[in-house]
Image (spheres, grey):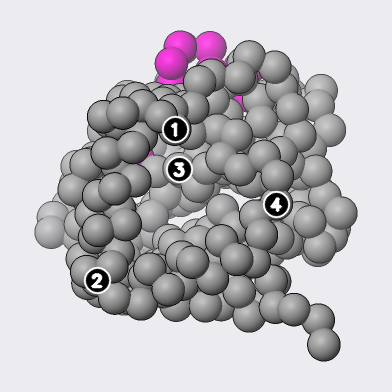
Amino acid sequence: MNGKSILFLLVNYFNEREVAEFISSQLGEELKEDVQVIVINNGSNDSMILKDIEQKYFNVTILNPGKNLGYFGGASYGLNHYLKNNSGYPDAMIICNTDISFADKGFMTKLKNIIDEKQFDVLGPDIYSSFLNYHQNPYIINRVQARRIKLYKFVTSNSFFYFVFTLLHLIKTKLLKSNSKQRLNEAMETYAVHGSFMVFNKSYFIKGGTISNPTFLFGEELFVAEITRKLGLKTIYEPSLVVNHFQNATTGTFKSSNSVGYLHQSYSYLLETFFAEKK
């Protein structure tokens, strides 16, 4: 993959130690001329940690938008910065969490080869959640139906409804293991991939794709899935790439009332924009 470029967009929200550790431990040896990292600092308790990382690695850039832009909002801010300082889109752009690790040291080499050899617009690796004890990709194989989005919109209209719904779902998936997702060993085309690690081929943007999601938080997977569906693009699940996801049980599952409100806004937008019945 000589001469090709990879851009990592990392969104920080008062989690700068984890961001710095991810860059050092997972990307440190890979931070060469063809791999760049932009950290969008939505909020920080100790900005010196990020400044130290920026000084240590010549191709790590820390951006401070001055306010919390959300997940894809922050990523869009980072991408716009990249485009202002480069001649075009990178060959591949990755939006990912920092509570992850690559399963083997050859991850980046495999990723570069796949970008070179496979045809895709959006890609998701095998993501194993140690908390939920299942594989999070392929996130959704077939397109969801409008009634499912309507259900989620209703559930998130009230914090208590959401808590009960989430608790029941957690019991079903974790304790009863009745909805556990086993690892799929074959690469496949899929509707949506998990938002904790999403790879966007340059072709996604050239063909009209966007990450400018108008909602503040959540629903990014469905937003991208519907954009790719509308444009006739290809999303694939690639099991040869393995990511371990160490998501937090509290922040990742039981959300605050503000977060439930953001969820509700996201499902409302998705329903009205992509799943509204044609008149």
Give the foreground label among 2 and 3.
Answer: 2
Q: Earlier in the sequence, mark 3 or mark 1?
A: 1
Image height check: is 88 above or below 183?
below
| Residue neighbourhood size for the residue with mark 3, other residues' Cα within 10 Å, grouped as few (<14), some (14–19), many (≥20) | many
Find disc 1 in the rendering and name its residue: 179
Asked whether 180 falls inside the magenta stretch, the response is no
Q: Which residue is mark 2?
A: 159
Mark in the foreground, 3 or 4: 4
Percent position of residue 270, x then y? 59, 71
Q: Report the Cα–Cα distance between label 3 and label 4.
A: 19 Å
Give the side of residue 244 with respect to residue 107, left or right: left
Q: Residue at horizontal 21%, vertical 42%?
A: 249
Answer few, some or many: residues within 10 Å of disc 2's Cα (few below 14, many 20 plus, some between 14 and 19). Answer: some
Query: Which quadrant of the figure contains the N terminus?
Result: top right
The residue where tag 3 is placed is 196
The answer to which of marks 1 and 4 sits earlier in the sequence is 4
Q: Secondary structure at mark 3?
A: loop
Inspect the image, locate mark 1, and give the three-letter code of the amino acid beneath it. Answer: Asn
Q: Which residues are magenta?
A: 98-111
The picture places residue 167, in percent across and down from the top left corner, at 25, 49
Give the SS element for disc 4: loop
Task: Tell me the element at label 1.
Answer: loop
- Going by the numbered disc 3, the residue's amino acid type is Ser
Q: CA distance from mark 4 to mark 2?
A: 27 Å
Q: Quadrant of the C terminus?
A: bottom right
Residue 232 position within the rendered picture, expressed as x and y whole percent measured from the top left: 86, 54
What is the number of the mark on residue 143? 4
